[in-house]
Protein backbone atom coordinates (compact mmCIF):
# COMPACT_ATOMS: atom_id res chain seq x y z
CA UNK A 1 0.00 0.00 0.00
CA UNK A 2 1.29 3.48 -0.92
CA UNK A 3 1.85 6.15 1.70
CA UNK A 4 -0.87 8.80 1.78
CA UNK A 5 -0.26 12.41 2.85
CA UNK A 6 -2.96 13.42 5.33
CA UNK A 7 -4.31 16.73 6.55
CA UNK A 8 -6.54 17.34 9.58
CA UNK A 9 -9.05 20.20 9.57
CA UNK A 10 -10.15 21.12 13.08
CA UNK A 11 -6.90 19.77 14.52
CA UNK A 12 -7.04 21.68 17.80
CA UNK A 13 -10.42 20.28 19.00
CA UNK A 14 -10.86 17.05 20.94
CA UNK A 15 -11.67 14.86 17.94
CA UNK A 16 -8.97 16.63 15.92
CA UNK A 17 -6.47 15.82 18.67
CA UNK A 18 -7.56 12.19 18.52
CA UNK A 19 -6.93 12.21 14.76
CA UNK A 20 -3.43 13.56 15.42
CA UNK A 21 -2.64 10.72 17.84
CA UNK A 22 -4.01 8.09 15.43
CA UNK A 23 -1.68 9.23 12.66
CA UNK A 24 1.37 8.42 14.79
CA UNK A 25 2.83 5.18 13.46
CA UNK A 26 -0.02 4.53 11.03
CA UNK A 27 1.22 2.13 8.33
CA UNK A 28 -0.51 3.93 5.43
CA UNK A 29 -1.01 7.54 6.50
CA UNK A 30 1.57 10.30 7.10
CA UNK A 31 0.50 13.45 8.89
CA UNK A 32 1.44 16.33 6.60
CA UNK A 33 -0.72 19.36 7.43
CA UNK A 34 -2.92 20.70 10.23
CA UNK A 35 -5.60 23.38 9.99
CA UNK A 36 -7.96 25.11 12.38
CA UNK A 37 -9.64 28.50 12.79
CA UNK A 38 -7.89 31.81 12.21
CA UNK A 39 -7.25 32.06 15.97
CA UNK A 40 -4.75 29.19 15.79
CA UNK A 41 -3.39 29.82 12.30
CA UNK A 42 0.33 30.62 12.08
CA UNK A 43 1.19 28.97 15.40
CA UNK A 44 3.17 25.76 15.87
CA UNK A 45 0.68 23.02 16.76
CA UNK A 46 2.19 22.55 20.22
CA UNK A 47 1.55 26.22 20.96
CA UNK A 48 -1.95 26.16 19.42
CA UNK A 49 -3.10 23.40 21.81
CA UNK A 50 -1.15 24.60 24.86
CA UNK A 51 -3.37 24.16 27.92
CA UNK A 52 -5.99 22.38 25.79
CA UNK A 53 -4.36 19.05 24.97
CA UNK A 54 -6.92 16.50 26.22
CA UNK A 55 -5.37 13.19 25.18
CA UNK A 56 -3.67 10.83 27.64
CA UNK A 57 -0.74 10.37 25.25
CA UNK A 58 1.63 13.28 24.62
CA UNK A 59 1.52 15.30 21.41
CA UNK A 60 3.24 13.20 18.71
CA UNK A 61 6.63 14.56 17.67
CA UNK A 62 5.60 14.73 14.02
CA UNK A 63 2.79 17.14 14.92
CA UNK A 64 4.49 19.43 17.47
CA UNK A 65 6.27 21.73 15.06
CA UNK A 66 3.74 21.78 12.22
CA UNK A 67 2.45 25.28 11.57
CA UNK A 68 -1.33 25.41 11.82
CA UNK A 69 -3.00 26.64 8.64
CA UNK A 70 -6.24 28.62 8.39
CA UNK A 71 -8.87 26.07 7.31
CA UNK A 72 -10.73 28.69 5.27
CA UNK A 73 -8.09 31.09 3.95
CA UNK A 74 -5.47 28.40 3.27
CA UNK A 75 -7.81 25.83 1.71
CA UNK A 76 -6.14 25.83 -1.72
CA UNK A 77 -2.69 25.55 -0.17
CA UNK A 78 -3.73 22.70 2.14
CA UNK A 79 -5.53 20.81 -0.64
CA UNK A 80 -2.34 20.88 -2.69
CA UNK A 81 -0.23 19.46 0.15
CA UNK A 82 -2.19 16.28 0.87
CA UNK A 83 -3.93 13.28 -0.65
CA UNK A 84 -7.02 13.73 1.55
CA UNK A 85 -8.18 15.40 4.75
CA UNK A 86 -10.04 14.45 7.90
CA UNK A 87 -12.50 17.09 9.07
CA UNK A 88 -13.80 17.66 12.61
CA UNK A 89 -14.78 21.29 13.07
CA UNK A 90 -17.03 23.24 15.42
CA UNK A 91 -19.04 25.46 13.07
CA UNK A 92 -22.63 25.98 11.94
CA UNK A 93 -23.90 23.17 9.73
CA UNK A 94 -24.28 25.29 6.61
CA UNK A 95 -20.72 26.56 7.09
CA UNK A 96 -19.42 23.00 7.47
CA UNK A 97 -21.22 21.85 4.33
CA UNK A 98 -19.72 24.75 2.38
CA UNK A 99 -16.22 24.15 3.78
CA UNK A 100 -16.23 20.41 3.03
CA UNK A 101 -17.55 20.90 -0.49
CA UNK A 102 -14.92 23.60 -1.02
CA UNK A 103 -12.17 21.07 -0.37
CA UNK A 104 -13.92 18.42 -2.46
CA UNK A 105 -14.12 20.84 -5.40
CA UNK A 106 -10.39 21.48 -4.92
CA UNK A 107 -10.00 17.75 -5.72
CA UNK A 108 -9.20 16.93 -2.09
CA UNK A 109 -11.27 14.03 -0.69
CA UNK A 110 -12.82 14.78 2.71
CA UNK A 111 -13.45 12.10 5.36
CA UNK A 112 -15.66 13.85 7.87
CA UNK A 113 -16.58 13.34 11.50
CA UNK A 114 -19.16 16.14 11.24
CA UNK A 115 -22.91 15.62 10.95
CA UNK A 116 -23.55 18.37 8.38
CA UNK A 117 -23.45 16.12 5.28
CA UNK A 118 -24.99 12.96 6.77
CA UNK A 119 -28.29 13.59 5.00
CA UNK A 120 -26.86 14.88 1.73
CA UNK A 121 -28.30 12.35 -0.72
CA UNK A 122 -25.11 11.41 -2.55
CA UNK A 123 -22.76 11.55 0.46
CA UNK A 124 -22.08 8.07 1.85
CA UNK A 125 -22.39 7.63 5.62
CA UNK A 126 -20.42 4.48 6.35
CA UNK A 127 -19.56 2.03 9.08
CA UNK A 128 -17.19 -0.24 7.11
CA UNK A 129 -18.42 -3.45 8.73
CA UNK A 130 -22.07 -2.63 8.00
CA UNK A 131 -22.48 -0.78 4.69
CA UNK A 132 -19.13 -0.57 2.90
CA UNK A 133 -20.90 -0.78 -0.48
CA UNK A 134 -22.42 2.68 0.10
CA UNK A 135 -19.14 4.25 -0.98
CA UNK A 136 -20.44 3.72 -4.53
CA UNK A 137 -22.50 6.88 -4.00
CA UNK A 138 -19.25 8.79 -4.50
CA UNK A 139 -19.54 8.21 -8.26
CA UNK A 140 -22.81 10.18 -8.35
CA UNK A 141 -21.44 12.83 -6.02
CA UNK A 142 -18.42 13.43 -8.23
CA UNK A 143 -20.72 13.97 -11.20
CA UNK A 144 -22.71 16.56 -9.20
CA UNK A 145 -19.58 18.34 -8.00
CA UNK A 146 -17.80 18.10 -11.34
CA UNK A 147 -14.72 16.54 -9.71
CA UNK A 148 -12.34 13.77 -10.66
CA UNK A 149 -10.93 12.95 -7.19
CA UNK A 150 -12.78 15.15 -4.74
CA UNK A 151 -15.73 14.00 -2.63
CA UNK A 152 -17.11 14.02 0.90
CA UNK A 153 -17.68 10.83 2.92
CA UNK A 154 -18.92 10.80 6.51
CA UNK A 155 -19.23 8.52 9.49
CA UNK A 156 -22.38 8.13 11.55
CA UNK A 157 -23.12 9.57 14.98
CA UNK A 158 -21.12 8.29 17.96
CA UNK A 159 -24.28 7.21 19.81
CA UNK A 160 -25.03 4.53 17.17
CA UNK A 161 -21.70 2.76 17.30
CA UNK A 162 -22.63 0.22 19.97
CA UNK A 163 -26.24 -0.83 19.37
CA UNK A 164 -26.44 -0.58 15.55
CA UNK A 165 -23.56 -3.04 15.03
CA UNK A 166 -25.20 -5.37 17.58
CA UNK A 167 -28.62 -5.17 15.86
CA UNK A 168 -27.31 -5.49 12.29
CA UNK A 169 -26.67 -9.27 12.15
CA UNK A 170 -30.11 -9.87 13.72
CA UNK A 171 -32.12 -7.98 11.07
CA UNK A 172 -32.45 -11.19 9.04
CA UNK A 173 -34.88 -12.55 11.62
CA UNK A 174 -37.41 -9.83 10.90
CA UNK A 175 -36.85 -7.34 13.69
CA UNK A 176 -39.93 -5.20 14.21
CA UNK A 177 -38.74 -2.50 16.60
CA UNK A 178 -36.08 -1.54 19.11
CA UNK A 179 -35.82 0.77 22.10
CA UNK A 180 -32.47 2.18 23.16
CA UNK A 181 -31.25 4.32 26.05
CA UNK A 182 -27.71 5.65 25.66
CA UNK A 183 -25.39 6.76 28.45
CA UNK A 184 -22.82 9.00 26.80
CA UNK A 185 -19.42 10.15 28.03
CA UNK A 186 -18.48 13.80 28.37
CA UNK A 187 -15.75 13.58 25.72
CA UNK A 188 -18.64 13.33 23.27
CA UNK A 189 -19.30 16.97 24.12
CA UNK A 190 -15.60 17.78 23.65
CA UNK A 191 -15.12 18.10 27.40
CA UNK A 192 -12.95 16.81 30.22
CA UNK A 193 -13.87 16.91 33.92
CA UNK A 194 -11.37 19.76 34.35
CA UNK A 195 -13.27 21.82 31.78
CA UNK A 196 -16.73 20.68 32.90
CA UNK A 197 -16.63 20.26 36.70
CA UNK A 198 -20.44 20.42 36.85
CA UNK A 199 -20.56 16.92 35.35
CA UNK A 200 -18.85 15.31 38.34
CA UNK A 201 -21.46 13.28 40.26
CA UNK A 202 -24.07 14.26 37.67
CA UNK A 203 -26.31 12.94 34.89
CA UNK A 204 -28.09 15.14 32.33
CA UNK A 205 -31.15 13.56 30.66
CA UNK A 206 -30.81 15.52 27.42
CA UNK A 207 -28.27 15.88 24.59
CA UNK A 208 -29.42 18.25 21.86
CA UNK A 209 -30.25 16.48 18.57
CA UNK A 210 -28.90 13.15 19.74
CA UNK A 211 -32.16 11.24 20.00
CA UNK A 212 -33.22 12.16 16.47
CA UNK A 213 -29.84 11.04 15.11
CA UNK A 214 -30.03 7.81 17.09
CA UNK A 215 -33.42 6.98 15.59
CA UNK A 216 -32.95 8.17 11.99
CA UNK A 217 -29.33 7.46 11.04
CA UNK A 218 -29.65 3.66 11.29
CA UNK A 219 -32.16 3.81 8.42
CA UNK A 220 -29.45 5.29 6.19
CA UNK A 221 -26.83 2.77 7.35
CA UNK A 222 -29.25 -0.11 6.64
CA UNK A 223 -30.41 1.35 3.31
CA UNK A 224 -29.55 0.02 -0.16
CA UNK A 225 -27.85 1.67 -3.13
CA UNK A 226 -30.09 1.29 -6.18
CA UNK A 227 -29.41 2.92 -9.55
CA UNK A 228 -26.85 5.27 -8.05
CA UNK A 229 -29.05 6.54 -5.21
CA UNK A 230 -29.67 5.45 -1.65
CA UNK A 231 -33.02 3.97 -0.67
CA UNK A 232 -33.52 4.25 3.10
CA UNK A 233 -34.45 1.22 5.16
CA UNK A 234 -38.03 1.31 6.45
CA UNK A 235 -37.29 -0.40 9.74
CA UNK A 236 -36.97 -1.66 12.34
CA UNK A 237 -38.44 1.37 14.07
CA UNK A 238 -36.16 2.74 16.80
CA UNK A 239 -37.05 4.97 19.73
CA UNK A 240 -34.19 6.48 21.72
CA UNK A 241 -33.43 8.45 24.86
CA UNK A 242 -29.93 9.84 25.39
CA UNK A 243 -28.23 10.80 28.66
CA UNK A 244 -24.93 12.56 29.37
CA UNK A 245 -23.23 10.74 32.24
CA UNK A 246 -20.20 11.30 34.47
CA UNK A 247 -17.75 9.21 32.45
CA UNK A 248 -14.77 10.51 30.47
CA UNK A 249 -14.87 8.08 27.51
CA UNK A 250 -17.20 5.33 26.35
CA UNK A 251 -20.84 5.36 25.27
CA UNK A 252 -23.02 2.65 26.84
CA UNK A 253 -26.45 1.63 25.57
CA UNK A 254 -29.31 -0.44 26.95
CA UNK A 255 -31.19 -1.96 24.03
CA UNK A 256 -34.52 -3.79 23.80
CA UNK A 257 -35.63 -5.59 20.62
CA UNK A 258 -38.88 -7.10 19.37
CA UNK A 259 -39.16 -9.52 16.43
CA UNK A 260 -42.12 -10.22 14.19
CA UNK A 261 -44.49 -13.00 15.14
CA UNK A 262 -42.85 -16.40 14.72
CA UNK A 263 -39.42 -14.97 13.81
CA UNK A 264 -37.85 -14.71 17.27
CA UNK A 265 -34.34 -16.27 17.33
CA UNK A 266 -32.96 -18.15 20.32
CA UNK A 267 -30.35 -16.66 22.62
CA UNK A 268 -27.86 -19.19 21.24
CA UNK A 269 -28.54 -18.00 17.67
CA UNK A 270 -28.07 -14.36 18.68
CA UNK A 271 -24.77 -15.03 20.41
CA UNK A 272 -23.54 -17.06 17.44
CA UNK A 273 -24.50 -14.26 15.04
CA UNK A 274 -22.61 -11.74 17.14
CA UNK A 275 -19.54 -14.00 17.33
CA UNK A 276 -19.50 -14.58 13.57
CA UNK A 277 -20.28 -11.05 12.42
CA UNK A 278 -17.59 -9.47 10.25
CA UNK A 279 -17.61 -7.07 7.33
CA UNK A 280 -15.55 -5.64 4.51
CA UNK A 281 -13.09 -4.09 6.99
CA UNK A 282 -12.16 -7.54 8.32
CA UNK A 283 -12.18 -9.08 4.83
CA UNK A 284 -9.66 -6.49 3.61
CA UNK A 285 -7.61 -6.65 6.83
CA UNK A 286 -7.67 -2.87 7.22
CA UNK A 287 -5.04 -1.62 9.72
CA UNK A 288 -7.56 -0.13 12.19
CA UNK A 289 -10.17 -2.89 11.91
CA UNK A 290 -10.76 -5.05 15.01
CA UNK A 291 -10.17 -8.72 14.35
CA UNK A 292 -13.35 -9.53 16.30
CA UNK A 293 -15.88 -6.74 15.78
CA UNK A 294 -18.47 -7.79 18.39
CA UNK A 295 -17.37 -9.26 21.73
CA UNK A 296 -19.90 -10.88 24.07
CA UNK A 297 -19.21 -11.01 27.82
CA UNK A 298 -20.82 -13.74 29.92
CA UNK A 299 -20.19 -11.93 33.22
CA UNK A 300 -23.35 -10.10 34.38
CA UNK A 301 -21.40 -6.96 35.36
CA UNK A 302 -19.80 -6.50 31.92
CA UNK A 303 -19.17 -4.56 29.79
CA UNK A 304 -17.89 -1.66 31.86
CA UNK A 305 -16.60 1.60 30.44
CA UNK A 306 -13.27 1.66 32.32
CA UNK A 307 -12.54 -2.02 31.68
CA UNK A 308 -13.78 -2.51 28.13
CA UNK A 309 -13.83 0.73 26.13
CA UNK A 310 -10.29 0.12 24.80
CA UNK A 311 -11.04 -3.39 23.56
CA UNK A 312 -9.08 -3.95 20.32
CA UNK A 313 -7.61 -0.44 20.52
CA UNK A 314 -11.04 1.06 21.11
CA UNK A 315 -12.41 -0.20 17.79
CA UNK A 316 -14.47 -3.21 18.95
CA UNK A 317 -17.98 -3.26 20.39
CA UNK A 318 -18.62 -4.95 23.76
CA UNK A 319 -21.96 -6.63 24.47
CA UNK A 320 -23.39 -8.28 27.58
CA UNK A 321 -26.47 -9.19 29.64
CA UNK A 322 -28.53 -10.71 26.81
CA UNK A 323 -31.73 -12.01 28.34
CA UNK A 324 -35.51 -12.25 27.70
CA UNK A 325 -37.64 -9.19 28.38
CA UNK A 326 -41.23 -9.02 29.64
CA UNK A 327 -42.34 -6.37 27.08
CA UNK A 328 -39.91 -6.90 24.20
CA UNK A 329 -38.34 -10.22 23.18
CA UNK A 330 -34.79 -9.57 24.40
CA UNK A 331 -32.67 -6.91 26.04
CA UNK A 332 -28.91 -6.41 26.25
CA UNK A 333 -26.28 -3.76 26.96
CA UNK A 334 -23.44 -2.66 24.72
CA UNK A 335 -20.46 -0.30 24.76
CA UNK A 336 -18.20 1.46 22.28
CA UNK A 337 -15.41 4.02 22.63
CA UNK A 338 -16.95 7.26 21.46
CA UNK A 339 -13.81 9.11 20.29
CA UNK A 340 -12.23 6.01 18.72
CA UNK A 341 -14.82 3.71 17.13
CA UNK A 342 -17.42 6.46 17.45
CA UNK A 343 -15.42 9.37 16.03
CA UNK A 344 -11.81 9.68 14.85
CA UNK A 345 -11.06 5.94 14.81
CA UNK A 346 -14.18 5.23 12.78
CA UNK A 347 -13.22 7.95 10.31
CA UNK A 348 -9.68 6.54 10.00
CA UNK A 349 -11.16 3.10 9.30
CA UNK A 350 -13.43 4.65 6.66
CA UNK A 351 -10.41 6.36 5.06
CA UNK A 352 -8.59 3.03 5.00
CA UNK A 353 -11.58 1.46 3.23
CA UNK A 354 -11.67 4.28 0.67
CA UNK A 355 -7.95 3.85 -0.01
CA UNK A 356 -8.22 0.07 -0.30
CA UNK A 357 -11.15 0.39 -2.70
CA UNK A 358 -9.27 2.99 -4.82
CA UNK A 359 -11.56 5.95 -4.10
CA UNK A 360 -8.59 7.87 -2.69
Image (cartoon, helix red, strand yellow):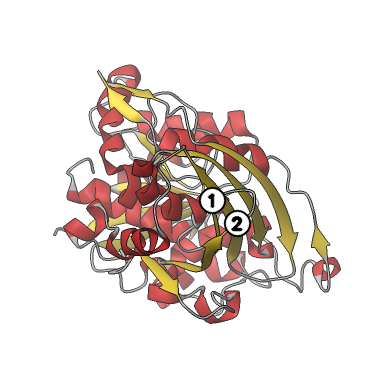
Residue beneath label 2, please? 325
Residue beneath label 1, please? 329
Residue 69 placement (x, y as % from top left) = 50, 51
Residue 7 placement (x, y as % from top left) = 39, 53
Q: Nearer the viewer, residue 288 or 170?
A: 170
**Measuring 34% from the left and 47% from the top, which residue is drawn there?**
130
Instruction: Mark yes or no: residue 299 visible.
Output: yes
Residue 251 placement (x, y as % from top left) = 59, 62
State the separation of the CA atoms marked 1 and 2.
Answer: 5 Å
Q: Quick check: 3 above or below 232?
A: below
Q: Nearer the viewer, residue 228 or 241?
A: 241
Q: Is residue 123 left or right of residue 286?
A: right
Q: Is residue 14 left or right of residue 81?
A: right
Pointer 2 local density, CA inside 10 Å: few below 14, some 14–19, many at least 20: few
Residue 312 placement (x, y as % from top left) = 38, 74
Q: Is residue 114 left or right of residue 347?
A: right
SS type, badge 1: loop
SS type, badge 2: loop
**Measuring 60% from the left and 69% from the top, which residue is drawn there?**
249
Amino acid sequence: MKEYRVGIIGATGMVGQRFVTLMEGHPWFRLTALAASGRSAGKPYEEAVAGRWAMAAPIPEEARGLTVLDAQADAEKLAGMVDFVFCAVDMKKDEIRALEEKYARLECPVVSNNSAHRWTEDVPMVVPEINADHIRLIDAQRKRLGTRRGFVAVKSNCSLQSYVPALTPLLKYGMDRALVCTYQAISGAGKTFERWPEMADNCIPYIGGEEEKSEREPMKLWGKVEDGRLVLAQGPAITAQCFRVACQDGHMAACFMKFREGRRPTEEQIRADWANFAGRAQELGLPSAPKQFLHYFEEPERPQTRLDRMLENGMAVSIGRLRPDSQYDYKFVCLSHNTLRGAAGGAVLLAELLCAENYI
